[in-house]
Amino acid sequence: MKIGILNTGNVGSRLARAWAAADHQLVLAKDGEDRKIAPLLAELGDRASLGSFEQAAQFGDAVLFSVYWPRADAVIDAVGSALDGKIVIETMNPLGVTDNFVHFHDHAFMRDNSTAEYLQQRLPRARVVKAFSLLAAPVLEEAAWSSSPSRPNVFYATNDQEAGQVVRRLIEDAGFTPINAGSLQAARQLEQLGVLLHHIAEHEYNGDADLIRLGVSIVEAIPGPIVRERMA
Ligand SMILES: NC(=O)c1ccc[n+]([C@@H]2O[C@H](COP(=O)([O-])OP(=O)(O)OC[C@H]3O[C@@H](n4cnc5c(N)ncnc54)[C@H](OP(=O)(O)O)[C@@H]3O)[C@@H](O)[C@H]2O)c1
């Protein structure tokens, strides 16, 4: 499949590597300095080439939209109509950032909106699917799970069932278990879950340094048969 990576950052570079290994063809765009992804492009060889946001959007049948939330509008403007009709896999969390690179959640925005719904509203002809927003970028690598008996779940949410099926396969190709969380509006709950995971990281896992362990908390565990008794 042809995939455009709209922003080859912490998340985009991991997924680019995984999808290239699964024989997909990629165009990588970087928000910021292109030189930072030169080593990745060299590593991926003829599986990937460098492009602008617009070129990566035009190239992909599916396009990863994985940019910093404060940069979302600028990137949407740069892409223009190139995402019309495309499957757009959206990974964002509504995080602001201070000058010292300290992140904070935009709770006011989250009350009745999500980055996924916002993107769909800005790109009405795109087929937006929310996915990959919960696992910390370092655990989006195959190597992180090499000694694990099971693969972590990746939740996705969309109003476009056909696009959802394509994204299911791409989640599997990246080495994870796809879990359908429902309509695009469920992105609100997924983004709230992201807030909860940050709280857990802080209070249980000693801060962001241990965020990697959060991947483990999203592994599915299926209990044995449960007898559901009605309360009298
Ligand atoms: N990172 C994660 O673990 C993660 C997980 C799930 C979802 N998401 C979401 O996915 C989207 C893309 O995230 P991303 O992390 O892949 O974005 P990114 O493009 O890697 O980083 C966003 C911006 O922050 C800068 N930056 C990154 N790390 C930095 C650091 N340690 N110190 C100073 N500046 C730094 C980047 O600068 P350079 O261009 O110079 O690198 C870039 O301008 C975001 O909306 C995010 O909320 C992220």
Image (tube, rainbow, N blue to C red):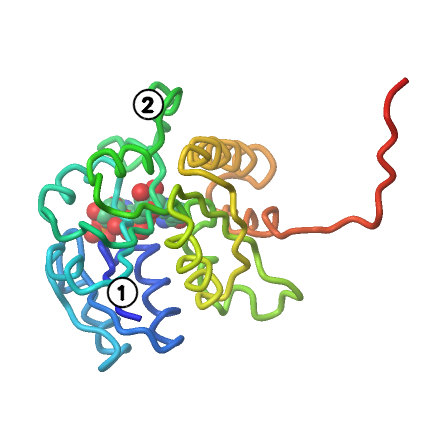
In this view, the residue farthest toward the right is 232
Q: Amino acid at mark 1?
A: Ile
Q: Return the x and y of residue 99 as percentages of the image width and height.
A: 22, 33
Residue 3 is tagged as: 1
The quadrant where residue 102 appears = top left
Going by the numbered disc 2, the residue's amino acid type is: Phe
Q: Return the disc, 2 or 1, that comes first in the chain's sequence.
A: 1
Left or right of residue 217: residue 199: left
Q: CA distance from mark 2 to mark 1?
A: 30 Å
Q: Look at the picture and state if 108 lies above or below 71.
A: above
Left or right: 221 in relation to 79: right
What residue is pinned by disc 2? 109
Residue 33, given in percent of the width and then of the height, sits at 13, 57
Nearer the observer, 20 or 68: 20
For residue 71, side relative to residue 66 (left or right) = left
Residue at 22%, 63% in the rendered image? 60
- Which quadrant is home to the N terminus? bottom left
Q: Nearer the viewer, mark 2 or mark 1?
A: 1
